[in-house]
Structure formats: structure tokens, C-alpha cells
Amino acid sequence: GDSVTQMEGPVTLSEEAFLTINCTYTATGYPSLFWYVQYPGEGLQLLLKATKADDKGSNKGFEATYRKETTSFHLEKGSVQVSDSAVYFCALRRGSGGSNYKLTFGKGTLLTVNP
Amino acid sequence: DAGVIQSPRHEVTEMGQEVTLRCKPISGHDYLFWYRQTMMRGLELLIYFNNNVPIDDSGMPEDRFSAKMPNASFSTLKIQPSEPRDSAVYFCASRLQGGEQFFGPGTRLTVL
């Protein structure tokens, strides 16, 4: 079945450091890929997405590139801020077929950014 | 516009009691999802509805769990009887066909 594996946290960085959170996936067909962010006490929010190979999703300084050859969708940010402290989830949704409604999530990675 | 609304935000109950969680999806959305989040298992899809009809409940852990959607603007997730292992954060999400999912703020359930 479909699965998403993301790097285990927690990740602790100083402000302005470079961030990478690794994500790899297993799925049939050509899924769409997502990063969601969950701030403390809140629900998940869509951060960025990519729907086909080589697409780059970007938002709020975060980027991720859909790499079909390595089945990866790593999240990066060049300079993190304290306000980026949150849990980040990688997810996929199948492109077609009976399960194209369903998001499959990774376990989440807790990021803490210190001033 | 209001987002997905869930109530209560926090629920503490004793083992054996009935628990009802409520969700109001975003107006006009035709899909509604219930998720459970725990440290051990992460985020799990429990059930989803399309146009108020349950489509896939394969994620519902056992018969103690039930979900209903009597109309397009309201859904409930009920646990009867509740057990300590049901303690988790329960999220409701909704979306339009072809659109992205929007999550509610969650209900933190503690079963003592």
C-alpha cells in the first residue's frame, strides 16, 4: 500500500539556519505530494504541494521538489525563523483510481527554532 | 469565512462513558474526513463521507466507534464505551471535489 516515510525528529535549529526535512514515499501511479504544517494547538494547514514529477512547490520561503527517480519530496528553507517552530507532515494522494480522495501522511517531524 | 469547526476542543471523560465529537465542515464542501492523531500511530484516517454518505470506514478501529453525517453541515463521531486507549486528538477535515483538505482545530480527548 501507499506509505510516506519522513525523518524522525525532533529537529532543533538556531534562527537563520538552513532546514531540510527528508521525505520519501511509496505509491502506485503518479501521486500528488504535499507538506502540511501543524502549529501548537491547531489543525494541519497545507504548506505546499506538487502534482507531477519535477514540480517545485513553494510557500513562505519553504520549497520542495517532486523527484520521481528517488521517490522523494524533501522540504527545505534557507533561513528558518522562531515562528517556523511546528510539526511538519509529508503526505501523498494518489492521482487516480478509487483512493484518490485519501491522503496518506508521514509520522510528522517536530521542528524547534531557537532565537 | 469560517473554517472547519469542531467541538468540544477538549474532552475529559471516564472509561466506559459515551463520547460524542462534533464537526461543522466548510460550507459547500462535499467531502468530510475524520482523523485520529496519536504519538504512537501518527495521523490515521478513520472514515470519510461524500455528500453525507459514508464511503470508507475501514479505518474505524472497532465497533465502539461510529460516525454519522445527518446533513451537509454537521457530522458526529461517537465512541461508546470509551477506553483509555482512545485518548488522542481527533481532527475533522473537509474539501471540495478536486480541492485541498482543510482541517479543523481538533478535539483533544482524554479517557481516564
Image: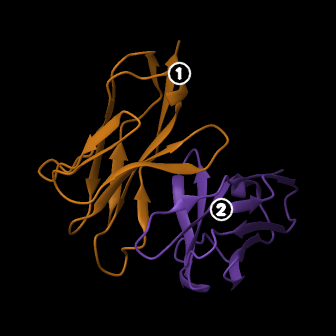
Chain colours: A orange, B purple
In the image: residue A60, left or right of residue B68:
left
Q: Residues within 10 Å of mark 2 (few under 14, many from 20)?
A: many
- Look at the numbered discs 2 and 1 and tell me whether their residues touch, using CB distance below 8 Å: no
User: Considering the numbered disc 1 on the image, is that residue within a helix, a strand or a loop?
Assistant: helix
In the image: residue A100, left or right of residue B27:
left
Callouts 2 and 1 on one subunit: no
The amino acid on which the numbered mark 2 sits, given as a three-letter code, is Val
Q: Let me know if residue B34 appears in the view.
A: yes
Q: In the image shown, does B20 or B22 lie closer to the viewer? A: B22
Q: Position of residue B78 (x, y in %)?
A: 76, 72
Residue position marked by numbered label 1 in the rendering: A82
Identity of the residue drawn at 37% across and 17% down:
A17
| Distance from the alpha carbon under mark 2 to that under mark 1 | 27 Å
Q: Let me know if residue A22 appears in the view.
A: no
| Label annotation for residue B4 | 2
Q: In the image shown, does B46 or A32 lie closer to the viewer? A: A32
Identity of the residue drawn at 52% across and 49% down:
A45
User: In the rendered structure, the residue with mark 2 lies on which chain?
Assistant: B
Residue extending farthest to the left is A69
Residue B24 position by quadrant: bottom right
